[in-house]
Amino acid sequence: DQQVKQNSPSLSVQEGRISILNCDYTNSMFDYFLWYKKYPAEGPTFLISISSIKDKNEDGRFTVFLNKSAKHLSLHIVPSQPGDSAVYFCAASAETQGGSEKLVFGKGTKLTVNP
Amino acid sequence: EPEVTQTPSHQVTQMGQEVILRCVPISNHLYFYWYRQILGQKVEFLVSFYNNEISEKSEIFDDQFSVERPDGSNFTLKIRSTKLEDSAMYFCASRENRDNQPQHFGDGTRLSIL
């Protein structure tokens, strides 16, 4: 099941530069997209989300872009900080009759921000 | 900030034994979820729960699994007769009863089946 794909298992950037994490999806029914950050031995921590009626959402250093025609979203972190080093998961959900809105996750991208 | 709490953090169980994983969702949340992550694989949905009943479950969630909200604060996942392949991190999540709200996750229970 490859409905949500993160094709880069890892990314390394210098402190202060921009980090761009990418995610592709195949299910056109997805209407809500999220990014989670995960440190070892912790659960996924919600970072930022975007609904399908928007193409951009910004929260401080984090911006998510959604390109529905390409079924692609990206997370931009600028400026990147060493504390941003973690695994980043892209997730998506589709509105269902039962209201479940289960999340479908990508495999994650490990971001390393070097001082 | 309110958070989802899970206990225990690590559970070691013999194959064939029953195990109960416990979760306390965020207090004003009404949707509850269990996910699992087998080592090296994706986080996968198991089940969602709303209004005291299962709203959706995955193929993984077979008759060996059950969920319960025994009181106003706890949400449990029971595996009746554990198998080696049940070894995984199990995450509980909850969200508000409004559209397009993020799910908030606990730190997980690492289940090891021997």
Image (cartoon, coloured by chain):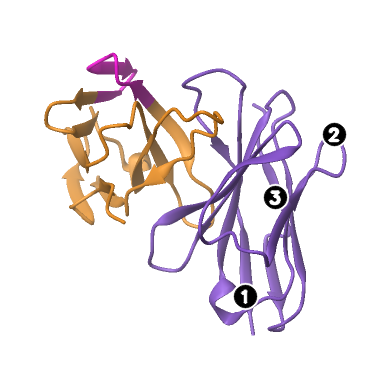
Q: Position of residue B83 (x, y in %)?
A: 62, 79
Q: Main secondary structure of the magenta part?
A: strand
In which chain is the residue bearing label 1?
Answer: B
User: Disc 3 designates what residue?
Assistant: B6
**Is A63 one of the magenta-colored residues?**
yes
Chain rendered orange: A
Residue type, numbered disc 3: Gln
Looking at the image, which is closer to me, A14 or B68? Answer: B68
Residue A16 vs A105, above or below: the answer is: above
User: Disc 1 designates what residue?
Assistant: B112
Name the quadrant of the N terminus of chain B: top right
Q: Which mark is residue B72?
A: 2
Looking at the image, which is closer to me, A25 or B9? Answer: A25
**Is A81 one of the magenta-colored residues?**
no
Outermost residue toward the top? A53
Q: Position of residue A61 (x, y in %)?
A: 30, 23
Residue type, numbered disc 1: Ser
Q: Position of residue A41 (x, y in %)?
A: 53, 57
